[in-house]
Structures are given as structure tokens and as C-alpha cells.
Image (cartoon, rainbow, N blue to C red):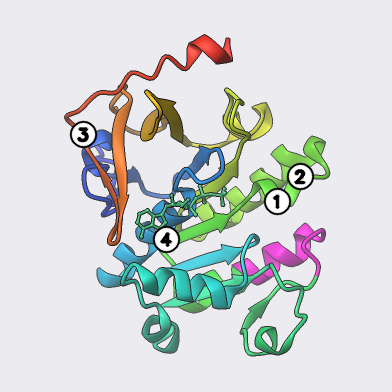
Amino acid sequence: MSVIEKVKTGIPGFDELLYGGIPKRNIVLLSGGPGTGKTIFSQQYLFYGLQNNEPGVLVALEEHPVQIRRNMASFGWDVRKYEESGQFAIVDAFTGGIGEAAKRERYVVTSVDDVGELVDVVKAAIRDVKAERAVIDSVSTLYMTKPAMARSILMQLKRVLSGLGATSIFVSQVSVTERGFGGPGVEHAADGIVRLDLDEVNGELVRSLIVWKMRGTKHDMKRRPFEITDKGIVVYPDKVIRIGREYYQG
Ligand SMILES: Nc1ncnc2c1ncn2[C@@H]1O[C@H](COP(=O)(O)OP(=O)(O)OP(=O)(O)O)[C@@H](O)[C@H]1O
């Protein structure tokens, strides 16, 4: 019997929900509304890899690479030395190559509407650093204006990343009230879905997550609370949370 290799996210409390980690080469859709912690979760996943000799690539579509390095450093995740040693790369799919700071970026996608160009640059970055982990933040940006293309865009990226051996998180933005994870095209194409939520309970915002699907492993089926601290995300795998979300989302 072959045992499926797992990739530890390193997020305290989370790997237990997956009985060890994400099955290798899976594409995990990390879905949630604004401010739910998707970016922090995915950056923590990459940095844990770097600390454990697993190179990574971050495809930045939502924020300037300069801002990403700064935000990561604020959690103690300083990626510069890993960029210098060739174990980490940020693909700049944000600036379009415009601006002084953008000129210093090594991997730049000039037209985000051109998925072919994006795929080529991502491929080069993955090969150069020999990435075992990849994050796209966010995939929603790629098909916001052309939802009919969502599935084919996702499949192209999946083929490249999974084919090159990377285990990936695709950040998927959904609106606060949306019950889904980013549309049927992507939800079925992804190997896993993790949903992050922020809900008002008794006048207070409460964070929780649920593993909706994960090909290649059994997984926890309960809604678990988590927190964001100065060191990143901490999940409480032994606590259950009920948020009565069905009331307003039926
Ligand atoms: N040092 C910190 N300590 C505690 N919470 C923090 C800290 N830094 C950020 N946060 C929380 O994390 C949230 C931002 O998380 P993140 O950027 O990962 O969200 P996101 O799901 O990617 O959102 P969006 O889709 O809007 O970009 C902030 O709104 C804040 O509540």
C-alpha cells in the first residue's frame, strides 16, 4: 500500500485537522471573505517551508511585492535571505512592471490578463527555486472580469504547479454573504477546500475555519475556532464553534 506523502503547513493546530498535512501536489482553495486571514495563512505556510528547507514561490496579484515583504516581516517572517539564497521568489503580477521598485523585481508579469505570460513566469520561478510550495494570492483576481474562464485558468495553473511537484494554496476571495468558495468551476477543480470565516457573535467578531474537502486524506469535519496573533495563525483543533450561519445564508 502506498502512503500519500503529506506537506505540513506548520500552522499550529491545523495539520491535525488533515491527519498530518496537505497531500503532496494538491491544489487547495483557501476561500473566505475580506479580512478572514487568507493572506496570513498562505504566507505562514510558505515561511514554514523555507525554515524547513522547502523552497517556495508566492504569486502576488493583490499587493505590491515590497508591501508583502514588509507585512511578512511584521510577523517575523523575513523572506529576504531566502530570496538571496535562491530558495524563495515572489512573482510580481501586481505592478505590471510600472514604477522604480518594480524594476528591481526578478519575476514580473506585465499583463495579468495574459494567462499564458503568467504561466510562463510562474513556471520559471518554480523551476529556478525548485519550489515545493506555491501560493497564488489571489486566483480570483485572474478571472474576476471573465468568470466563464475560471475553470480553464485554474486547470492551466494546476497542471503547471502540480506537474512541477509543488503543493499549492490558491487564495479565493468570496463576498461576506456568499455561501460558496469561488464558483463551481474552481470548487470542483481544486483538490481541497478550506474555508475561513469571520462572524459577528454577540457583538464580537469571531474567527473560524472548516476543511470542506481534501482529496487524498481523511479530514476533520467540524468548524474550529482560530486566532491571528503577532506570530500568525493558531487553530484550536479541539474546540468546536457554532455560528448559526445558515440563518442568514439559506
Ligand atoms: N498582528 C496581528 N495580530 C492580530 N491580528 C492581525 C494582525 N495583523 C493582521 N491581523 C488581522 O488579519 C486581518 C488581515 O488578514 P489577511 O490579510 O490575511 O486577510 P485576507 O483574508 O487575505 O483579506 P482580503 O481578502 O481582504 O485581502 C486584519 O484585518 C486583522 O484583523
Three-letter amino acid code at the position of disc 1: Thr
Q: Which mark is residue 141?
A: 1
Foreground pick, 169 / 104 = 104
Relative height, residue 69 to residue 202 (above, below): below
Q: What's the mark number on residue 144?
A: 2
Residue 115 belongs to the span the image colors magenta: yes
Image spot of residue 1 (x, y percent) = 22, 34
- Give the farthest residue toward the front: 203
Classify 10 Å Cα crowding around label 1: few (below 14), some (14-19), many (20 and above).
Answer: some
Kindly tell me whether residue 55 is visible in this rendering: no
Earlier-in-chain disc, 4 versus 1? 4
Q: Are marks 1 and 2 in contact (CB under 8 Å)?
A: yes
Question: Which amino acid is tagged 3?
Answer: Pro
The label shown at residue 107 is none
Neighbours of disc 3 within 10 Å: few (<14), some (14-19), many (20+):
some
Answer yes or no: disc 4 within 8 Å of ligand 1: yes
User: Could you tell me which secondary element the residue under label 4 belongs to?
Assistant: helix
- Dot 2 falls on a residue whose secondary structure is loop
- The residue sitting at 66% across, 30% down in the picture is 183
Residue 116 part of the magenta-drawn span? yes
Amino acid of disc 4: Gln
